[in-house]
Amino acid sequence: MIGKFSALWCLRCCALGFLLLAGRPGLAQERAYLLGVIGYGESAQMIASEYEGLSAYLSRIVKRPVRVEGSRNFDVFAERAKSKRYHFIFAAPSAIIQANRDAGYEPVAKVPGRLAAAFMAMGKTGIAFPEDMKGKRIGFTGKDAMITKLAFYELRQLGIKDPEKHFSSTAYYNDADGVLAGMQMNLIDVGVANAGLFNAWVQKGEDINLIHSGKGVPHLTFAVRGNLPEYEKKAVAEALLKAGQDKDASDYFKYSGMAGFEPAKLADFDELTKILDIK
């Protein structure tokens, strides 16, 4: 009799638990943290694969699953960050600054080195100096990409106030690989990408001239949502600085070609904020 009573009681408890979960469909996912990145057209599978090592490492640090979610462009990313959808974000510093302004995200770590916009052309074009670019076809990464915004800042510094009149045509690509392909296929004469990619492409044997390289700014940056517990934010910040020593996280660095993380604080981005006039 007691056994039957216990079994009945367990069934009732299970049924009650099921009803509670049914009434809260998001409960099963509440324990997961979201890491927001900008995917620029990459599939969810590609993004998950790229960040698998880093997300596994973070999952162990915060003791809950960390899932990566990619946004197709800066605007989508900014809207999601503004609504505080993400617990962590990892993106170009311009996106981090905007997320801080909109929703209080706090930068805690960044990739060592600097990012800069580089104007380049295939060697066979003979385009080697900024004055050679006039009347040529130019290609950038996405309109909202930080490198593109930095490129337009550099054009102003070069005295080019109206790029639409200065160049014969302007094209935008989903990513830097599109810029390289555009130059190779003679779809554009001048390509703009991260200066680090120029070096990488030359090392791979591409015959490319560097026309002009702009001002360097902080590299990709990791930020945490401001309303997370202080102990958790501190744990993530400290863990990122040691990420290169972890097997999972180091796999991410091998995949991305990055060297690891160094400390970051909001003041590191003051100059970039002024350059891009981020309010």
Image (cartoon, rainbow, N blue to C red):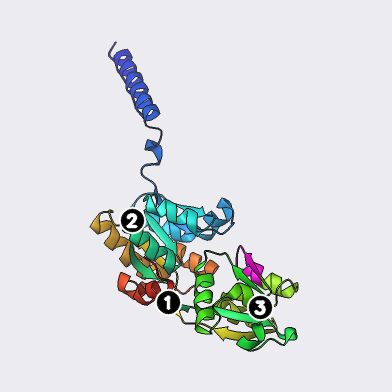
Marks 1 and 3: which is nearer the front?
A: 3
User: Viewed as shown, does residue 257 lie left or right of 23?
Assistant: right
Tell how many labels: 3
* Residue 251 image point, x, y percent: 50, 65
In space, the residues marked 2 and 3 are separated at their CA atoms by 37 Å
Residue 153 visible? The answer is: yes
Pointer 2 residue:
103
In space, the residues marked 1 and 2 are separated at their CA atoms by 25 Å
SS assignment at label 1: loop
Is the residue marked by circle 3 packed among few (<14), some (14-19), or many (20+) residues within 10 Å?
many
Pointer 3 residue:
190
Q: Amino acid at mark 1?
A: Pro
Q: Nearer the viewer, residue 69 or 143?
A: 143
Q: Amino acid at mark 3?
A: Val
Q: Nearer the viewer, residue 196 or 232?
A: 196
Where is residue 246, by image quadrant? bottom left
Which residue occupies 34% across, 71% down?
A: 264
In space, the residues marked 1 and 3 are separated at their CA atoms by 28 Å
The magenta segment is: 170-179
Pointer 1 residue:
112
SS assignment at label 2: helix
Which image quadrant: the N terminus?
top left
SS assignment at label 3: strand
* Residue 116 image point, x, y percent: 50, 78
Mark closest to the chain's N terminus, 2 or 3: 2
Is the residue marked by circle 2 packed among few (<14), some (14-19), or many (20+) residues within 10 Å?
some
